[in-house]
């Protein structure tokens, strides 16, 4: 008896790969998740309409359940997150009683961004993925579905307990910054100061400091010691070792400067300016957030 399979299938304008994949992948489709963009402005961008038509055809041919999920076809992170969320929900559904290999991701359809996001989700989760070859371009193939053989990133991603504790500490931290008014000065240890004009930022940062902001998952080194309740003198080497490990795995990134406020209450009116100090901060990455959020990645 063939196994039952839950398929996750991104789609765009082309839809032949959907049916070819469901028909050629080993196992009987029991449920299909269609990932599609909302309708665009032009007549050729009726993606939601296409998805509804595909849904009807799947139900007609395979008599299985279909769910549709809207995604941003130009945002790789959004595609990856949508797939990981679907996997998480299916694994947690007590009615399913399934394992990772009972799911499959079709990485063929949609934009290149959707394909890359799908492959990354497969590599992270270890859910099998497959590619559907074009029958019109290659009419003599015996099998039009190729299961991808991806490296076992999950095995390499397992963390030591201390590394996991540090990752959770960084994730739970929050950095507050009131915003840039005029200038920032970079203070170098044993060197000259360098003044940066407004909106010229350290290239390590994604964040722009011209607005008041609170950033979750971003902490100073001192704050991280506080969160972990560690003795700075005794645990310094331990922290450095595990932070290096987390950074090498792509779960966090290290930032060499910290923005700080300089107040001058003696001036009328009182002024506040800002400077970037050469003090280390740690920020959790999207991969790090996925690692903590989805236990099937760990």
Image (cartoon, rainbow, N blue to C red):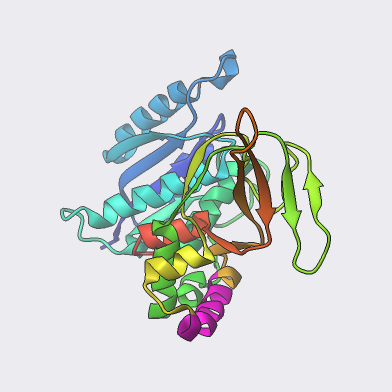
Asked whether 217 or 91 is in front, the reply is 217
Q: Identify the residue at horizontal 68%, vertical 62% (top origin).
A: 278
| Residue sitting at the far right | 192
105 to the left or right of 119: left
Residue 257 point in image, percent of width and height: 66, 58
Position of the C terminus, as image quadrant, is bottom left
Residue at 48% in and 61% down: 288
From the top left corner, tell me how far across and down residue 42 is, in percent: 59, 14
Residue range in magenta is 233-246
Does residue 162 appear in this view?
Answer: yes
Q: Position of residue 224 (x, y in %)?
A: 46, 66
Q: Residue at x 57, y 39 (%)?
A: 75
Q: Is residue 282 magenta?
A: no
Q: Is residue 174 above or below residue 244?
A: above
Q: Is residue 124 above or below residue 30?
A: below
Nearer the observer, 162 or 63: 162
> In which quadrant of the rendered view does residue 35 lie?
top left
**How many discs appear?**
0
Q: Where is residue 146 drawn, in percent x and y?
A: 54, 58
């Amino acid at each position: 008896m063939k196994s039952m399979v839950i398929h996750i299938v991104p789609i765009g304008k082309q839809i032949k790969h959907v049916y070819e994949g469901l028909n050629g992948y080993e196992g009987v489709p029991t449920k299909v998740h269609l990932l599609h963009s909302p309708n665009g402005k032009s007549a050729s961008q009726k993606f939601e309409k296409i998805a509804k038509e595909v849904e009807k055809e799947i139900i007609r041919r395979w008599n299985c359940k279909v769910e549709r999920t809207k995604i941003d076809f130009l945002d790789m992170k959004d595609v990856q997150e949508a797939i990981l969320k679907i996997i998480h929900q299916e694994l947690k559904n007590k009615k399913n009683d399934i394992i990772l290999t009972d799911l499959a991701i079709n990485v063929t359809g949609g934009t290149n961004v959707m394909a890359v996001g799908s492959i990354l989700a497969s590599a992270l989760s270890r859910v099998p993925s497959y590619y559907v070859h074009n029958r019109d371009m290659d009419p003599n193939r015996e099998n039009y579905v190729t299961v991808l053989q991806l490296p076992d990133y999950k095995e390499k991603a397992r963390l030591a307990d201390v590394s996991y504790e540090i990752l959770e500490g960084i994730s739970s931290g929050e950095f507050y910054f009131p915003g840039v008014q005029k200038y920032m000065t970079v203070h170098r240890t044993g060197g000259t100061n360098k003044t940066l004009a407004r909106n010229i930022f350290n290239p390590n940062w994604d964040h722009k400091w011209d607005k008041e902001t609170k950033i979750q998952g971003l902490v100073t080194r001192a704050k991280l010691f506080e969160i972990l309740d560690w003795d700075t003198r005794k645990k310094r080497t331990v922290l450095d070792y595990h932070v290096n490990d987390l950074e090498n795995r792509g779960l966090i990134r290290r930032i060499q400067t910290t923005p700080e406020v300089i107040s001058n209450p003696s001036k009328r009116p009182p002024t506040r300016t800002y400077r970037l100090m050469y003090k280390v901060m740690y920020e959790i990455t999207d991969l790090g957030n996925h690692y903590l959020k989805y236990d099937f990645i760990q």
